[in-house]
Image: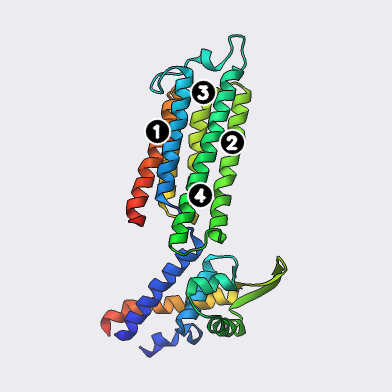
């Protein structure tokens, strides 16, 4: 059992980080406010989770000005795609093996 | 054991977020019904103008001049009728969709909505130009089948960014368009079925499935 758990990525343990990754996987680019609305979280909360993902280089940040207002958008990196996929595969294995617990 | 339930919850959350963030789900069923009714009214106007019902076969003499070329009076009426139908159908659809989004406190003009409009417009504009060229060559009897086929392809294309049922509607429009190719002269009847009846059936189905 320990070997299965080992494949779960610690970085994705929070629901919000899981949410950010799943949204970014199906969209080319998503900005901060859209993420906030979809996940229903506060600014500070989301920012700290995004920071954690960014430090791991799982997501890429793009800062620009839209109509003279700063706009920050995010995209998933190749590394992040692979890490998230591995994590999902591990989750799937655990659920399949679950019956034996 | 508890752990397993938590993982399952996480997975269903992931699935729902992926769908909500990449698809435009505020498309209202009532939009379909209103577009269908407007389409039928448009054809009714055309059939009154021509003086016979849309179950009858359209006579060539109405559309083309004996000397060849298109009967301009008829074309002018038809074009104005078509433009009014398109404007009314589009604006009521947008109205009901915005109302549904507002009710659910969802953004209307987000990126899935933009992708939806783009994936609809490319085949639709192509089809529009294609039909105008058919008109240019006086191939009026091919216009309704072409409209149905291009519209169906637009819906199949757009189905990726909204409810999957839109793709199913698209498939039916294409099939009807192909059938219409074999019944030349019954353009008005196929218009009523494809743009009227199909929209009303689709809209009613969607309304009961997602909005009740």
Q: Residue at x 40, y 77 (%)?
A: B10
Q: Label 2's element?
A: helix
Mark 4 chain: B
Q: Determine if marks 1 and 2 fall on one subunit.
A: yes
Residue receiving disc 4: B94
Label of residue B141 in the image: 3
Residue receiving disc 1: B193
Q: How far across and how far down the image is residue A59, in percent?
A: 60, 76
Q: Nearer the viewer, mark 4 or mark 2?
A: 4
Neighbor class of circle 4 (other Cα within 10 Å; few <14, some 14-19, many 20+) is some
Mark 3 chain: B
Can residue B179 be seen in the rendering of this structure? no
Residue receiving disc 2: B128
Residue B26: quadrant of the picture: bottom left
N-terminal of the pair, mark 4 or mark 2, is 4
Q: Nearer the viewer, residue A94 or B41?
A: B41
Q: Determine if marks 3 and 1 fall on one subunit.
A: yes
* CA separation in Å, label 2 and label 3: 15 Å
* CA separation in Å, label 3 and label 1: 16 Å
Q: Nearer the viewer, residue B5 or A96?
A: B5
Neighbor class of circle 3 (other Cα within 10 Å; few <14, some 14-19, many 20+) is many
Q: Nearer the viewer, residue A39 or A67?
A: A67
Q: Determine if marks 4 and 3 fall on one subunit.
A: yes
**Quadrant (top left/top right/bottom left/bottom right) for the C terminus of chain A:** bottom left
- Considering every residue shown, the one lying at the far left of the view is A100
- Considering every residue shown, the one lying at the far top of the view is B66
N-terminal of the pair, mark 4 or mark 1, is 4
């Amino acid at each position: 059992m320990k070997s299965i758990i080992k494949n779960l990525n610690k970085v994705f343990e929070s629901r919000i980080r899981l949410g950010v990754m799943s949204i970014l996987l199906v969209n080319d680019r998503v900005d901060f406010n859209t993420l906030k609305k979809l996940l229903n979280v506060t600014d500070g909360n989301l920012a700290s989770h995004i920071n954690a993902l960014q430090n791991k280089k799982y997501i890429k940040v793009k800062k620009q000005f839209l109509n003279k207002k700063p706009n920050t958008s995010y995209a998933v990196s190749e590394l992040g795609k692979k890490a998230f996929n591995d994590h999902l595969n591990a989750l799937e294995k655990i659920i399949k093996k679950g019956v034996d617990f | 054991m508890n752990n397993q339930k938590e993982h399952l919850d996480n997975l269903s959350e992931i699935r729902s977020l992926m769908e909500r963030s990449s698809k435009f789900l505020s498309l209202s069923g009532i939009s379909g019904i209103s577009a269908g009714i407007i389409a039928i009214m448009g054809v009714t106007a055309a059939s009154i103008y021509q003086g016979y019902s849309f179950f009858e076969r359209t006579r060539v003499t109405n559309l083309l001049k004996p000397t060849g070329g298109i009967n301009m009076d008829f074309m002018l009426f038809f074009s104005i009728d078509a433009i009014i139908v398109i404007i009314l159908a589009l604006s009521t659809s947008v109205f009901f969709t915005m109302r549904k989004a507002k009710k659910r406190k969802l953004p209307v003009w987000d990126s899935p909505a933009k992708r939806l409009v783009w994936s609809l417009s490319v085949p639709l504009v192509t089809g529009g130009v294609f039909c105008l060229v058919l008109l240019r060559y006086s191939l009026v009897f091919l216009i309704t089948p072409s409209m149905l086929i291009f519209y169906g392809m637009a819906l199949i294309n757009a189905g990726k960014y909204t409810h999957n049922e839109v793709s199913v509607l698209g498939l039916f429009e294409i099939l009807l368009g192909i059938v219409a190719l074999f019944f030349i002269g019954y353009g008005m009847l196929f218009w009523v079925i494809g743009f009227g009846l199909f929209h009303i059936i689709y809209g009613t189905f969607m309304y009961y499935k997602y909005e009740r």
